[in-house]
Amino acid sequence: MPIDLIARATGHATRVAVVDSRGQHSYSDLLTSSGSVAAALLRGAGDLNEARVAFLVPPGFDYAATQWGVWRAGGIAVPLAVSHPSGELAHVLDDTDPTAIVSHPSFEARIHEAAEPRGIPVVLTSELNGTEPGVLPDVAEQRRAMILYTSGTTGKPKGVVSTHTQIRAQVTSLVDAWEWTAEDRVILTLPLHHVHGIINVLTCALWSGACCDVLSGFDARETWAHLMDRTVTLFMAVPTMYRRLISAWDEANSGDRAAMSAACSRLRLMVSGSAALPVTVLQRWLEVSGQVLLERYGMTEIGMALANPLHGERAPGTVGTPLPGVEARVVDQEMRDVAAGTPGELLIRGPNVFLEYWRRPQDTAAAFHDGWFKTGDIVVVKEGCYRILGRGSVDIIKTGGYKVSALEIEEAVRSLPGVRECAVVGVPDPDWGERVCVAIESVAGATLTLDDVRQRTRDRLAPYKIPKDLKVVTALPRNALGKVTKPAVAALFARDSGT
């Protein structure tokens, strides 16, 4: 029995599936090319039987054909980050022990540097075309399908294993909630080694028979040009991207601004995720585009779990309610349900939840409580909507006997003149337990002091929430999705304090 995603593509054979720098590619092209990839990987064998196949391929048609080819051969797809040097790729290769690596020719030197010492064969995408598929294996939906790695914002990245069934659940939940159809057209500017780009954009589009316009990466001006040039219906990005789009709009002349804003009005949905969306960015984007961004919540382990509604009011600063098929609970440290309005840890249950951490049975067991996945995120539910207060280990700061949300403090600091972006962390302190520290990217020409920040936030923050230390930095440390890596920020202050 073919995988549902592949089977559905046969019904859209003549439609355009992917548009990239090489042109248009139909669903029929995708089926043919992925069949060739599968045959080349099988090399006469009947089934890969969940062997891992890593691939280093830039976003575009070749990426989709490679991913589908691994699946059709019965393998587990392990997408590698094109932004990572060979040294960082080594962790994933050592952890997954793939039987082969598929690489785009442009990455051949880099991947050989990591693959050769490990004896892993490398196959170039240019060598995979034209192989006759022959008979491909039946792949049960319960099989392991993909290993994605956590962002590593709170520790060493772990391999998150999802089955075809779990991927289908993640995709169909979003297709249902966001009403995807074959008439949709979406722009992909996100990296394709994280769930946001792989599931929310590429796989939802291909499941629906829609068209995915793949850009080589994110560039604000190029993205604006594409929005104005194409009949796009959906766009999904992270808050950092929206900030850059706003900056590009601000720098444009009045005529171009009008055209840019008009282009946004044609879209039926614009989504923000992967990091907390500052209310100031949501409000500014509304002014620029006329669109109220839909904020949602997800993780590598669960796909998407919560979202504001497609139709109806979207509450600023919240991530909405559980998506179709998803259950959510908020609990205290003893795993008891808390009352509405009381902060607690978010637990998620449903067919979307991952199978296991790759080769980490203890970590897998520790991640669950009675079948519920422990997200590690602290939330509060008010009027039915979930608000993320931060990660328990990173964004909840225990200072002077109080628990405070780093995200709340960031929102206050971000509104100050001269602040482009900021990150708040707690650093061990003998008097306070943890002291509240803020790192700031300032606007060009702006001068900010700790006194400035403390004085200007007094009317918005309780005294124990006001930052006690400040660093102005050229750029905050971020991962591939633009998410700030809090441990690296904390290290800036810890070095000065000797902790």
Image: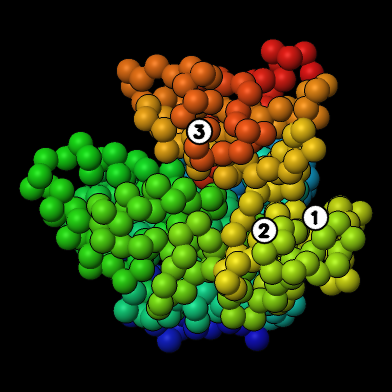
Q: Coloured how?
A: rainbow
Can residue 37 be seen in this snapshot? no
Residue 149 place in picture, x, y as percent: 68, 50
Give the distance between the C-alpha atoms of the residues marked 2 and 1, in whole angstroms: 28 Å
* Label 2 crowd (10 A; few <14 / some 14-19 / many >=20): many
- Assign a secondary structure to mark 3: helix
Circle 3: residue type:
Thr
The circle drawn on residue 420 is none
Q: Label 1 to label 3, Cα distance in Å? A: 44 Å
Earlier residue among tags 2 and 1: 1
Q: In this view, does 312 lie above or below 298?
A: below
Q: Earlier in the sequence, mark 1 or mark 3?
A: 1
Q: Mark 3 points at which residue?
A: 457
The residue singled out by tag 1 in the image is: 358
Q: Is residue 198 above or below residue 485?
A: below
Percent across and percent down for residue 372 are 80, 69
Q: What residue type is labelled 1?
A: Trp
Left or right placement of residue 16 versus residue 343 in this view: left
Q: How far apart are marks 2 and 3 (CA)?
A: 23 Å
> Which quarter of the image is occupied by the N terminus?
bottom right
- For this view, does 240 lie left or right of residue 93? left
The residue drawn where x is 51% and y is 40% is 460
Observer-side mark, 2 or 3, equals: 3
Residues 27 and 188: in front is 188
Decide which of 151, 69 is in the foreground and name it.
Answer: 151
Specify few, some or many for label 1: CA neighbours under 10 Å numbering under 14, 14-19, or 20 or more.
some
Mark identifier at residue 379: 2
Q: How many marks?
A: 3
Name the front one of labels 2 and 1. 2
